[in-house]
Image (cartoon, helix red, strand yellow):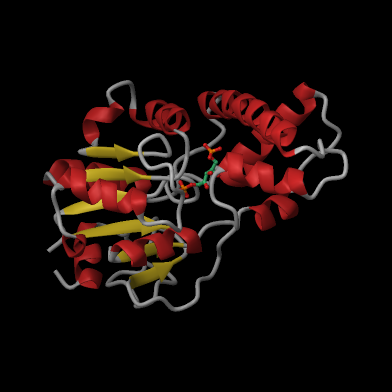
Amino acid sequence: MIRALLWDVDGTLAETERDGHRVAFNRAFETAGVPWRWSAAHYGRLLEIAGGYERLLHDLRHRDEAPAASAAREGLARQLHQLKNGFYEDIVRAGELPLRAGVAELLAECAAAGVPMAIATTTSSGNVAALLEHHLGRDWRGGFAAVVTAAEAPRKKPDPQVYQQALMLLGLAPEETVAIEDAPAGVLACRRARVPVIVAHSHYFPTLAAEALVRAAGPSLGSGAGWRPSAESSAAPIGLEQLRRWSGG
Ligand code: XBP
């Protein structure tokens, strides 16, 4: 029985990475006067590192133009990351990052059915607030029983901390919940927290290696087409009933 739904944010609620965080990082680079920019392909490779600050620091370590001393590199990464988050919020508020297909419908269905929801993300809390306020309105927080971000769970996915904390706040066992994820690090975090997971593939993560706790995987919550195991209807969006079928209750 699914008693709560746990939502990943980046790549799952919205395709925020290529046209959101990456673009915002590049604006931060330009503003700070650093000479490099991140292409969409390079950013895809960097996504192996969870967390915007950590991703940036990893990139700086491999750049000749970046400061050689680690304290200076960390200072620059902090400055650029803060700038990036400001630009990211501007992009969100400009309406450039729509919710993915089927997300608004599933959020509304859970709310109507009284199924509690939680946010479980590696992203900074300000980014989450900007995205959800833009799409769900100023009272967005009231729609979630728990919101766990990098502020509350600093150990980034694939560490299970964010999921463990969400479960603790919900007061539920992992098997009473199901997570919606897009990325391998998120799926691994779920496995480590023993949370069953539904994978909606995203731009940067179009496939996934077989994983024990993945109940189903497909291209989009917007329709049942292309899901494995197949959905009851290939036309209808993925709803609670379908999630229950895949999760065995
Ligand atoms: C996605 C991330 C984040 C974002 C950038 O997390 O790894 O780091 O890419 O956001 P999730 P920050 O899939 O768990 O939502 O710069 O705030 O880290």
Image location (x, y in percent) of residue 137: 34, 24
Examine the rendering and report whether any part of residue 1 can be seen: yes
Q: Nearer the viewer, residue 151 or 238?
A: 151
Q: In percent of the image, x 13 and y 47: which residue is there?
A: 113
Q: How many marks?
A: 0
Q: Position of residue 14 (x, y in %)?
A: 47, 44
- In the picture, measured across the screen, residue 109 lies left or right of residue 120, that is left
Where residue 48 appears, x then y in whole percent? 60, 58
Quadrant of res 23: top right
Q: Residue at x 14, y 53 (%)?
A: 172
Picture quarter with the N terminus: bottom left
Instruction: Quadrant for the C terminus, please.
Output: bottom left
Q: Pick whichever, 195 or 91, lies toward us.
A: 195
Residue 183 visible (yes or no): no
- Residue displayed at 24% across by 65% down: 242
Query: In the figure, 49 relative to 29: above or below?
Result: below
Tell me where residue 229 appears, x and y as whole percent: 34, 78
Q: Quadrant of residue 236?
A: bottom left
Of 59 and 183, nearer the camera is 59
